[in-house]
Image: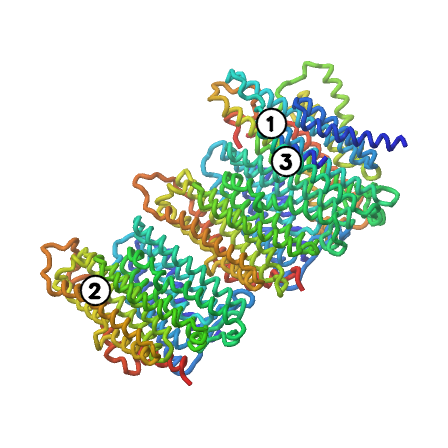
Amino acid sequence: MNVLSLTLLGVLFSSLLTGLIIFFLKEESHRLRTWLNLLGAGLKLVLVVALLRGIYLGKTYAWSFEFLPGLPLALGADANSMLFVTLSTVLWFWTTLYAVGYLEDSPHRSRFFGFFSLCVTATTGIALSANLVTFLIFYELLTVSTYPLVVHRGTAKALQGGRVYLTYTLLGGAILLLAVAWLYSLAGPVPFKERGAIEGLMVSHRRELQWLFLLFMAGIGVKAAIVPLHGWLPRAMVAPAPVSSLLHAVAVVKAGAFGIVRIVYDVYGAENAAELGVLPPLAIAASVTIVYGSVCALFQDELKKRLAFSTVSQVSYIVLGTAILGPLAAIGGLVHLVHQGLLKITLFFGAGNYAETLGIHRVSEMNGVGRRLPLTTAAFTVAALGMIGVPPLAGYVSKWYLSKGAVTAGDHWVTVVLAASSLLNAAYFLPILYRAWFLPPPEKWPAEHSFGRWETHWMLLAAPLVTAALVIWAGVFAESAFSPLAWVKLIAAREYGP
Amino acid sequence: MFAIGFYSLVVQTHLLRRIMALNVMGSGVFLAFLALALKAAAPMPDPVPHAMVLTGIVVAVCATGLALALADRVQALEAKEETPAPETPPPGATGSEPEDVG
Amino acid sequence: MTPAWFMGGLILGPLVAAALAFTFPKRGRGMACAAAGVVGIAVTALIRAVLGGGVSSHRVSGWGAPLGIDLRADGLAVLLLALTALIAVAVTGYAAPYLRATDSPEARHRERYFWPLLLFLWTALNALFLTRDLFNLYVALELLGFAAVALVALEGKGDALRAALRYLFVSLSASLFYLLGVALVYGQCATVDLALVAGRAQPGPALTVALALMTGGLIAKAALFPLHFWLPPAHANAPAPVSALLSALVVKGAFYLLLRLWFEALPVFHTPAAARLFGMLGAAAILWGSINALTQSRLKLLIAYSTVAQLGYLFLMFSLMTGRDGGFGAWCGALLLLGARACAKTAMFLAAGNILRAAGHDRINDLAGIAQVLPVSAFALGLAGVSLVGLPPSGGFAGKWLLLSAGLREGQWWGGAVILVGSLLAAAYIMRVMTRAFTPAAPGTAVRPVPPIMEWTALALALVAVGMGLAGSWLAELLRVGGPWP
Amino acid sequence: MIPQLLDGTLVLVVVVLAWRALNDRDLFRGVIEFIALGLLLAMAWLRLRAPDLALAEAAVGSGLTGALILSALVRMRRREQAAAGQTAGGATGPRGEARGKNHSRMVLGALSLAMLGILAWAALSLPAKSPGLTAEALARLPDSGVTNPVTAVLLNFRAYDTLLEIGVLLLAIVGVWALRRGDWPAADLRERLLLLSLLRWVLPLLAVGAGYLLWIGASAPGGAFQGGALLAGALLLALLSGLGKRLLWRERLIRTGLTLGVLVFGVAGAVALGWTGGLLQYPTGQAGAWILVIEAAALVSIGLTLGLLYLGGRPEEK
């Protein structure tokens, strides 16, 4: 056990241990819990930065442990993992801050933050998994640790939402388990490797591999909310706002999308997958999801529900990018993994602020919120415009690479899908912005709280502002050396390079 | 005998009969052991099955004792359930008075 | 100190403690603690001996088979001994406050007799796991059965008594079936030692019938579908710590014996047809038990039916033991599953006992608010559920994984499908309970306090069940010692 | 010729009696037939050259078991009558067997017959002559400390079985005590002087007899179990006459007596472990003495246990 693998484990344990300690804290020890939370999040951030630096300097990080005979639990840090782990760590830090402010005075906070930490542990684990079995383990752990968060409020609606969530994800998990076990029986534990790890089976087990791909997509597609497996996501938005952020931007949906990326690039290998002919169906499913999600979003009055359907649609951009052969589309898909996270978390923070400060839950109640909560609404606006794909914001970068990639690959119909989706995005976001800024506010807000100096609690305000700033940075400085795009280009070059 | 015992065990409903049936089954098994012991060619029957049967007999009587005690409790309970709230405990049912617990 | 000392301690420790606990009824708990100490040391030492020096055997009275009786501690035996010790210790810790719930004559009576019976049960299990002699196993089985029945009856209520009587009838007739089988084996092989029988066995009518008789008896004791009918009432009506012991250990004792019979004494009979029969019964048990668990209205009955289902997984292993690695994967999987489920089941029954104590009932539909009153118990229930469903990193997952991959490797798709469906059904019934438990309580629900140790014991076992997955490799290494493969 | 004829008749009578005992319409007669069956079985054991077992069967299998069942029957009958008297309708009589049950009876009967056939098939396939373990047992007999091979098996070769078995005995009494309070005699028969004086003679005789059986068990049929059964008989007499009342009121004493067998056996096992390094492995040359001590303790426990099993429950507890 050397320093390198310790760093790797440290990334996991920084949140695992804090989570476990928090479980046993008394409900009243608010200050201690907050400090522990932030300490864990901060420590994780520091460790991830160290990890990034190490990889930049050419070090390899790996740790493994024989979990069962012939079945190693392996962690590692490759370019793909770093993309996801950095995203989730950064966003987690701000989500934690936001959650502390959001949940002030609500009951069962120790339970909440305990599971919150476990949830991010699982996400980091997914990111750092070096083989398929480890991925599966953390993937299921994520399911288990998010369920209590979804039902946290304990209302009948929350319980119902939680039940739907668990039904979908456990079914998906079972399918994934079957797929992993099947592949294991053919090829062992399947370490993640650029360009795939199943080269040897391509000829002998062609048919099996095709079936397996279907199983993998069905299993992981639940979390990635690919239509028709998306049903849980809109219902799970009954959870508190920080949880929604977590579900939509940091952890669950992202884990699904990341899983698909892993399967296509590092288990099958993009070229092998294309050779098996499994990518076009995936691209079609993703396109259907993109359009369907957007159309549904159009008809939601409840703000969080509209955002949820928007997620259904947006996450499939990542899947789409993965399903189209060629480096450009890959770049578009992967970079959207980061961009969608930044955008969506900002939107959910904004929605949470509206609900918490003014008691607004519906789009139709949002008239004039821009005057009451100008900073929040500004952040919300940036994110919404980014989603639509207005240059030079983050969403624009993703969409540009995607359509370029599609054209290069010869899939011209994809550009139509993208254009339609952008139009639909505009159709469901712009009215909100219009209401917020240009319509007069009502006499009285549904349930207004006052937080003194700022328009709302400072923790609730800081998080969306920072993430909105990141949205602008990721778009404007996309071509700089330290942007998500630069990193993604590196990954694509390895996958498709000579 | 094993077969008779088993048949009676599953057919009979009375608890005592079932307990006796178990004993008869047991005797059948012991008989088998002893018949085996006779097959030894040596000057005397094989002592090992004999010892086993002795053990078996003792275990059987223990089982009978336990089963009877349990059957008695169950029967007392059923008698009580069929008798709507007796004001005075029925004579002879000393083993199962309300104060007799456990 | 030789392994003989440890084996002696494992048997004589609880036996003498049981006798003393009966002689001095007020010292019952002390005796149990003393026995726990002796057994704890002996088991630890025995594990070390087995890991260090391989299988250790001992000839009781110095004669050795076939005339005498041999004891043998291999990986499988010490694993189960350790599991028994763990659960018995937990139950001891739990039972002390449980039995002193009220200061009534009933409670005092129960406390007087619980301890000796518990210690007898423990003796019987230890004896069962160590001995290599088929007839000695019969005596150990009877010891086990009597103790279990008496413990069920200790509850003293009508349902419990009736269930205990039914259990006793099943147990006794099953023992007689087994004993008749032993007689036939002796007649054919002139020995009742497992290893010697294996050497002298030739397929023929006598041994076939013998094995059928013994298997029939043991299946009834292990409550494999369709001979499971006695289990749910007995387990659901017994006092909580007793239910835990029965569900976690007693039925597993019979299963252990089946393993010894089929894989060590008479492996010649482990034909594909027999394997398939067991597999089918196992699969039926999984589905039947799970579906029944789903429809129960009482928590303890639900857990009991879930035990029926879990036993099915163990028997599924019989049909998967044909692999290239000699079935080691499936073997490990089933035993890991056994261990994890035993801990999970104990945790669940103990948590159910807490709920029963606090709320005065265990109707699933009226569990609202339990998570607020008994957060630790609810948490234990949830964690145990995680292991039961087989979500990672629990021991349940590790076991399920091994079974599943063994099934897929052998091309036994239906086995894999049943395992998956079974775990989804398990998820469904666990979710049903958890959803109720997390519903906020209606105002004005009165609850009785539960001593913290009762809650934490349940949680500790649930944590062991979950954590067992991480020790999978170590356990596999242990299981490899003296197992029935090259 | 005549012995074969006798054996044949015995087998026939045993089978018929077994059927009658379990299926007689009158339960009481069934129990009596059951006891008779036990006695006949004892004879059968004698014919099978198992005198140790014949003794045990007559005393334990037939006598004690019969007494147990009979007293349970009487108790249940009385309770049924009491209940019937109270409900004034006799609703508690034996429930009429439904017609539909005949069907399942047939199936089960066929099943049992099939089982019989299979068992017979298996039994016939066994080797006609099997050496068993006689040769081994006899070869080791000189080292076992006793000359009766059955006792040697019980207390030396397979002493571990017997240890557990004594455990079963104790467990049985614990279980029964846990279940119910016994019908401990309250009546004092001191008035009946004649009976009393008779008992004063008989009881010591029985106790001596038990001791004798134990002693002789080393070399001839007999031993702790047979002796224990005799002791149990003595105890029962004492209890029923009220003589044993004072003795039995001392609960601690009874409990100690009941556990004596397990304790001495267990401690002996442990001491042997320390002495020779083997569980229950007696030091060379001293086996006879060890066995005698263990058997003596077991005798007390067996006698007490069997006797108290008859009472079917625990005494008054403080």
* Both labels 3 and 1 in a single chain: yes
Mark sitting earlier along the chain (3/1) = 3
Scheme of image coloration: rainbow
The image shows residue C116 at horizontal and vertical percentages of 59, 40
Provide the residue designation for mark 2. Answer: A428
Q: Mark 3 or mark 2: which is in front?
A: 3
Q: Residues within 10 Å of mark 1 (few under 14, many from 20)?
A: many
Residue type of the residue flagged with mark 2: Tyr
Q: Secondary structure at mark 2?
A: helix
Residue type of the residue flagged with mark 1: Gly
Q: Chain of mark 2?
A: A
Mark 3–mark 2 distance (CA, rounded to whole Å): 73 Å
Mark 3–mark 1 distance (CA, rounded to whole Å): 40 Å
Where's the C terminus of chain A, which quadrant?
bottom left
Q: Chain of mark 3?
A: D
Instruction: Name the residue nearer the viewer: C152 or C269.
Output: C269
| Residue A424 falls left or right of residue A147 | left
Q: Residues within 10 Å of mark 3 (few under 14, many from 20)?
A: few
Q: Secondary structure at mark 1?
A: loop
Quadrant in which residue D57 is drawn: top right
The dot on residue D107 is 3
Provide the residue designation for mark 1. Answer: D182
| Residue D285 falls left or right of residue D166 | right
Residue type of the residue flagged with mark 3: Val
